Image (cartoon, rainbow, N blue to C red):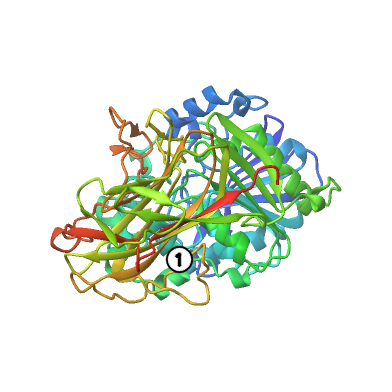
Amino acid sequence: MIDERDGMRIEWDVPIRMDDGVTLRADIYRPVESGTHPVLLTYGPYAKGLPFQDGYPDSWEALVRAHPEVAEGTTAKYVTWETPDPEKWVPDGYVVLRVDARGWGRSPGFIEPYSPREIRDLFACIEWAGTRPWSTGKVGLLGISYFAVNQWLVAGLQPPHLAAMVPWEGLGDQYRDSMYHGGIMTTSVDVWFRRTITTIQHGRGTRDGVNPNTGELYNGPETLSDEKLALNRSNYPGTIRGRRLFDEFYRARSADWSKITVPFLASGNWGGHGKHLRGAVEAFTRATSTQKWLEIHGEGHWVSFYTGHGVALQKRFFDHFLKGVDNGWDHQPPVILRVRTLDGFVDRSEQEWPLARTKWTRMFLDSAAGRLSDSPGETGEQSGFEAPGDGVTFYTEPVVEETEITGPVSVKLFVSSSTEDADLFLVVSVFGPDDREVVFQGAVDPHTPIAQGWLRASHRTLDPELTTEYRPYHTHDAVRPLVPGEIYELDVEIWPTCIVVPAGYRIALTVRGRDYEYADLDEAPQFSHFKGSQMRGSGIYVHDDPGDRPPEVFGGTTTIHTGAGYPSHVLLPVIPAGG
């Protein structure tokens, strides 16, 4: 079916046949005028016929209320979750191609998230789009989260017609970035799959609604039984629970940075702890592309993607690489930061990551005083805490002048446990003169701390080739239990951060045995996209699965050793003023 409306020529449910006979369905939004145009393609699970405002009304309302420009110059009838609005792109001479992934929405098939089969499908869709009579042969990829993750995966296959891509807040490592933070299993395995993905599976038919633009059921024309639906999807949560170490399963579903050569603009979120930050930074520092840019912002997960700032940035990039426009992008510094302050952001461009002028500053843990100090103490001290409690916090003195911290953070701890293992939850915070903690709107949680990191002590083995002083990299391929009471040296990766700390404020490091919770929270808000998911400071993906963290192993006493012989410290990326 072809419509001509709202200044676009729209083809609905166009078939794209895969090599195994499965036919995927796509919607194509094209300029009305004839000719060839570059293509922006998205391939993912969230039902191409389910409008953003219908599927996620609270999120849409909050987005438009805070950023009215999102709804300006568009009817918004064709906006879907985490994909570009065709009405913001087609008038500028782009084709927007939106494909329902195998097994979701209008596309039949067996669901296997991020699997090699799914990525071969995306490869085929890119090549299909690059050879259509309305295509210039240049295909770009653009989208958030799932639509970003599969960009990293397919780029490793190097599709001939893939010319450029913008993965916006997408993880690159299924194990480290999502399912097992520091070796500790997250609830992402349940929250994401069971509460989201199974609700938009192909074959739900009349159980769900219709695409208001076509009148067709957005989850497929047939309505299957629960039993048949279950047979059409993998037991992804069960598989993740059964694979607690990094192995070939995760490797096949994670980016191969050595094979990514396409130009890209990777986008991350300062408040994306546990999902939407690390992948972008790893891509920029490790991918072999010679034309690559890194952009990091704040606010909500999907906000910057749709705002004027985000769309303008995306268009400059794609105009240059897909249209050949001489718009100065070839002189764009490779790192684009929205530097976070207590009351907003300051836009700044940089030449590298981490920043070359970084003053790497060690602050040593002092158990006797509860302080972060310039030097280790002369005597050995220790701080113990029960894992179910609030842990121990170490504070700097109030900074005497405004201090910027931007970059990756690492922590070295000397630890003993009363049991054979210990889970460490590390939080970098800033406290005001009134001793109240400073928190920010994160990717999803409105009370996000400055930075977080995690490590299961039995996963302490480091990869000697990938580890740097400021970014420990753990292999997660073997379990090395602790001997109760013995002291172990642990290096913990803290995900990157950015904050300008005002004079008179203090920086703090907290070591805990459970997820961070904002102390001044009166009532935890719920995230409407994931019904029942309360946000207490660590977002919707936490680490409280009793099967992964039996109390007899992870509920003991953890002791941090500091001072003489045990130089436990945090390494902070301090950016000199005026540099």
Q: Which amino acid, by three-letter code, is at mark 1?
A: Ser
Q: Nearer the viewer, residue 488 or 127?
A: 488
Residue 334, above or below 161? above
Tell me residue 455's x, y (percent): 35, 62
Q: Nearer the viewer, residue 466 or 277?
A: 466
All told, the count of numbered labels is 1
Would you say residue 64 is visible in this rendering?
yes
Relative placement, left or right, of 241 versus 33 is left
Q: Residue furthest left?
A: 552
Residue 34, above or below 165? above
Label 1 crowd bin: few (<14), some (14–19), many (20+), radius 10 Å: some
Tell me residue 163's x, y (percent): 72, 59
Q: Nearer the viewer, residue 126 or 202?
A: 126
The N terminus appears in which quarter of the rendering? top right
Q: Which residue is mark 1?
A: 115
Q: Secondary structure at mark 1?
A: loop
Residue 13, above or below 124? above
Q: Which quadrant holds residue 120? A: bottom right
Would you say residue 9 is visible in this rendering?
no
Q: Residue furthest front?
A: 378
Relative placement, left or right, of 495 versus 337 is left
Tell me residue 37's x, y (percent): 77, 48
Relative placement, left or right, of 2 versus 364 is right
Q: Nearer the viewer, residue 409 or 284?
A: 409
* Residue displayed at 66% across by 35% down: 309
Tell me residue 345's x, y (percent): 60, 34
Q: Which quadrant holds residue 209? A: top left
